[in-house]
Amino acid sequence: RGGRPVTASPADTHCPYCALQCAMTLTPTPADGLPVSVEGRDFPTNRGGLCRKGWSSAELLTAPDRLVSPLLRGADGELHPASWDAALDLIADRIREIQDQSGRDAIGVFGGGGLTNEKAYQLGKFARIALRTSRIDYNGRFCMSSAAAAANRAFGIDRGLPFPLEDLDTAHTILMLGSNVGDTMPPFVSHLQGARARGGLIVVDPRRSTTARLTADGGGLHVQPVPGSDLALLLGLIHVVIAEALHDADYVTRRTSGFEALRRSVSMWWPERAEQVTGVPATDIRSLARRLAESASTYILTGRGVEQHADGTDTATAAINLALLLGLPGRPGSGYGTLTGQGNGQGGREHGQKSDQLPGYRRIDDPDARAHVAAVWGVDPSIIPGPGIPAVQLLQSSGRPGGIRALLVHGSNVVVSSPDVQSIRDALGRLDLLVVSDFFLSETARLADVVLPVLQWAEEEGTMTNLEGRVLRRRRALEPPAGARSELWIMAELARRLEAPGVWDLDPAVVFDELARASAGGLADYSGLSHALLDEGAAAHWPYPAGSTGTPRLFADRFAHADGSARLVAVRSRAPETPRGGELSLITGRLLEHYQSGTQTRRVAELEAAQPELVAQLHPATARARGLVEGGRVRLENARGAIEARVGVSGDIRPDTVFLPFHFPDASSANLLTSSRLDPISSMPEFKNAVVTATRVP
Ligand code: SF4
């Protein structure tokens, strides 16, 4: 059960869940059987607000099935408690044996966007110089990779929001594409209220989501395109902007390159053609383009709905092209940004968990970056492996020639959250060794050969980086349960057993200092930051080079490419997978009550009671045509799998579409139906557009 409060004084920290990282205070006033009480804390992002998940988060600390001992799979096929020495010795021995037989790349490492910056950094270092494997990637590949690739291509840097969240308050117009903050991060909605009051909130979503419903009063607009057609919609908007000379010609000339190629690429995307693909009337596309161009201050924001596609990088690129044509990025009161989802989705992609990156958001194939990071690590650059392979390929390589034979998973529940999840379950079944570090026996941990119990949010010190690139302090309020250990300790112990070079500190503040040195001079430069500085309350937006006071707003004078210009990149739309003859488009997303694979929120009684099972949202006409009734059961099926769900009938969804939340495991996993087709640029899977049949379960 949960630990004891560390001190009698309240701990100011941040929520364990999403990238808004709402500020909260944990007070050691035991009540209702909980070791701490949770209160929202005034902070520029959440203004004292918390959502239902945040308010109930203290329950995670007393979950009865908290892991408090390493588990080893025995000859009987069951997991049994074991000592830390036995577990770590076994892991080290098996790693050595497998690498002797099959090479260093036979070991894979899979990280997570919920790990603190310190742990994400140390995991990348552990993979490269303790295991000396190139095979590391993380679950942010499923989350942010396409938006990150698009931002890097256009701006030369990727920070989710290149401006503080409060900047949105004064906006006249906010165009949100594929984001449902009303459910995923409700305190964010306070930043939409200004645009909403001015009649300028525009939401693009195939569903009338909670966020889309905010457009209903005051002149807002909800655009409901065919699933998977977002790129065509954006190309239609860009066509109108250029054809009607609505673009900011001076900005485009001074601050961008690539206009001519972009102009030619959209010349055929007249609104009537976009209408054929998107279902959005051409007149609406024209009026939306004019409205965006005429607004005094405009923000364009994208989310997973338009990014989690096999053309996700190009779709995010088109949104950036539109923003650049309108002269938004870097203009006070306007901008473009992507809304990071996971708690440390931003920091998690900066410190070396990605297959092709080193700390500081540096490329692993850059000789200067390798030399800099190797010097910080105290190793020769030649021992740092080259680029690895992205998440889906990494997992699916298991047991294949040249693939991984062992996998170490930290902070990720891949058998629920991966696309085409049966293929991932099969892949894990081919491993010789699966090691999972988690604080609950997640569905992935249940399959492991070794399970290592680790600390959770209120039991550890560290930092997180929120969706604005603001570095935040996570503070310890509780003693962890006896038996659980920090990942930093686990990595240090394994590094010692593997006789790895380098220093493996256990103190997160010291690891942060090393991270800061490793990041110095990189795009995500943390070198001016420390735990002590953050404890003083600095508003710490990176880049934060030594001697600076950080960078709340990027792009005011220049973009990060060497010539200071942003790139307009011509992209082409591929036809979305569309349903035929009675099939439906499947889209997936989140509920207010649950977070990601549900490993945590399904253990909170209040949240579980509110959303206990998988419900498929279907339009009344769709339900009627199939004999489906509210509360009945529906079978959804395609070539990859089949699941059953409770029926939820709602006019909020298009008749050709079904919506499933992806928080539920095993036979209720929406990802049994999603596709592992990948974006060729970012390796983002096609999560948000699959075709299924729906039939009544008698
Ligand atoms: Fe936590 Fe996100 Fe809810 Fe804020 S919006 S309380 S960070 S889950």
Image: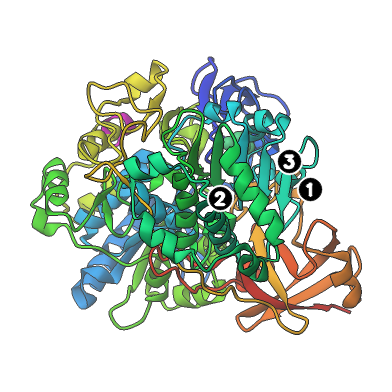
Determine which of the numbered discs, if any, sits on residue 609 in the image. 1
Front residue of 480 and 584: 584
Marker count (numbered): 3
Q: Are marks 2 and 1 in contact (CB under 8 Å)?
A: no
Specify the amino acid type for callout 1.
Answer: Ala
Front residue of 112 and 184: 184
Q: Residue at coordinates 56% horizontally, 32% vertically from top-left?
A: 297
Query: Label 3 neighbourhood size at 10 Å, few (<14), some (14-19), many (20+)?
Result: many
Q: Residue at coordinates 19% horizontally, 61% vertically from top-left?
A: 385
Q: Position of residue 87 (x, y in %)?
A: 37, 57
Could you tell me which quadrant the C terminus lies in?
Answer: bottom right
* Residue 11 falls left or right of residue 282: left
Residue named by callout 3: 220
Residue named by callout 2: 303
Q: Residue at coordinates 56% horizontally, 50% vertically from top-left?
A: 303
158 w.r.t. 628: above or below: above
Front residue of 405 and 318: 318
Q: Secondary structure at mark 3?
A: loop
Looking at the rendered image, the disc whose residue lies closer to the viewer, 2 or 1, is 2
Question: Is 508 part of what is drawn in magenta?
Answer: yes
Give the quarter of the image for residue 181.
top right
The magenta region covers 506-510
Q: Earlier in the sequence, mark 2 or mark 1?
A: 2
Q: Earlier in the sequence, mark 2 or mark 3?
A: 3
Q: Earlier in the sequence, mark 1 or mark 3?
A: 3
Give the quarter of the image for residue 435.
bottom left
User: Marks 2 and 3, how far apart in space?
Assistant: 19 Å
Specify the amino acid type for callout 3.
Answer: Gly
Q: Secondary structure at mark 2?
A: loop
- Image quarter for ligand 1 equals top right
